[in-house]
Amino acid sequence: MDGYNKNAHGGEFVTYERLSAMGNNGFQEPATGFAEGKIEGTQRLYTDGVFSTDNGRAQFMDAPWRGLQAPGKQQQKDNHRYLINNGRANVVWQSAYLDQENDFVMDRFPYPFIEMNPEDMAEAGLKEGDLVEFTMMPVRLRPWPIRRRQQGAGKPSCSSAFRPACRAMSPVPGQMNSSFRTTSRPGATFARFRTRPAM
């Protein structure tokens, strides 16, 4: 905390005791003050048009998609029907390491789930709740749930799927590609897969 207090904008307002007292009610950095027992945060960043650069101006960088440059990606595409993307599930904390003893979460999601487009499910003869195998790991299959559509996220497009990242029972990201590097090849976290009913 000493480093944060000395270096972060607004760090002087933040202490372990204050964070603990706020419980799950956090604040958006940078902190701007402390009042009525709460750390005050920033409603929205850069409303004054000044950015955290040497000259205060925003910097835009060209970052074209580099496609299938990671070794093995073209072979995956040629041999596997579906593209799987991984990310976070709202109810599951990170990799679920804090949820292993949480009955609310584990009763609801006893298996890591996969979300597929309903058209792909119909074509594969799969229905909601089926157990399927992909990359030799059993996961619970579900179509994209309505709650996600209500949040405006839509559903997976055909031939693509989504599953939570890093779930302890069936990890997905870096293990699927030996060339994975978070900053230089983020696309390596995508992988192709085939699916079949679990035996």
Image (cartoon, rainbow, N blue to C red):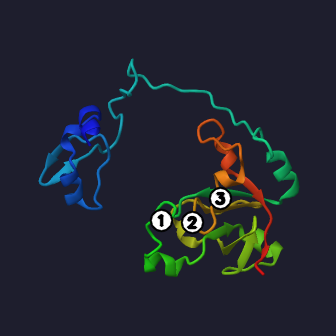
Quadrant where the C terminus is found in the figure: bottom right
Residue under circle 2? 168
The outermost residue toward the top is 55
Mark 1 touching mark 2, by CB under 8 A? yes
Left or right: where 194 falls relative to 64: right
Question: Residue 14: x percent and y percent?
Answer: 22, 45
Observer-nearest residue: 182 or 153?
Answer: 182
What residue do we see at 24% from left, 54% from top?
Answer: 19
Depth check: 170 or 88 in front? 170
Residue 144 seen in render = no
Q: Earlier in the sequence, mark 1 or mark 3?
A: 1
Q: CA distance from mark 1 to mark 2?
A: 7 Å
Residue type indicated by callout 2 = Ala
Give, as a three-letter code, the residue at label 3: Val
Question: In which image quadrant can residue 99 be found?
Answer: bottom left
**What residue did someone put label 3 on?**
172
**Gap in Å between the C-alphas at discs 2 and 3?**
9 Å
Q: Is residue 120 left or right of residue 94?
A: right
Circle 3 Cα neighbour tier, 10 Å, few/some/many (<14 / 14–19 / ≥20): many
Type of amino acid at the residue the image marks with label 1? Tyr
Residue 17 rendering spot, x and y as whole percentages: 18, 54
Measuring 37% from the left and 28% from the top, which residue is drawn there?
49
Local packing at callout 1 (Cα closer than 10 Å; few below 14, some 14-19, many 20+) is few
Residue position marked by numbered label 1 in the rendering: 97
Which residue corresponds to the image point at 80% horizontal and 65% vertical from the top-left? 194
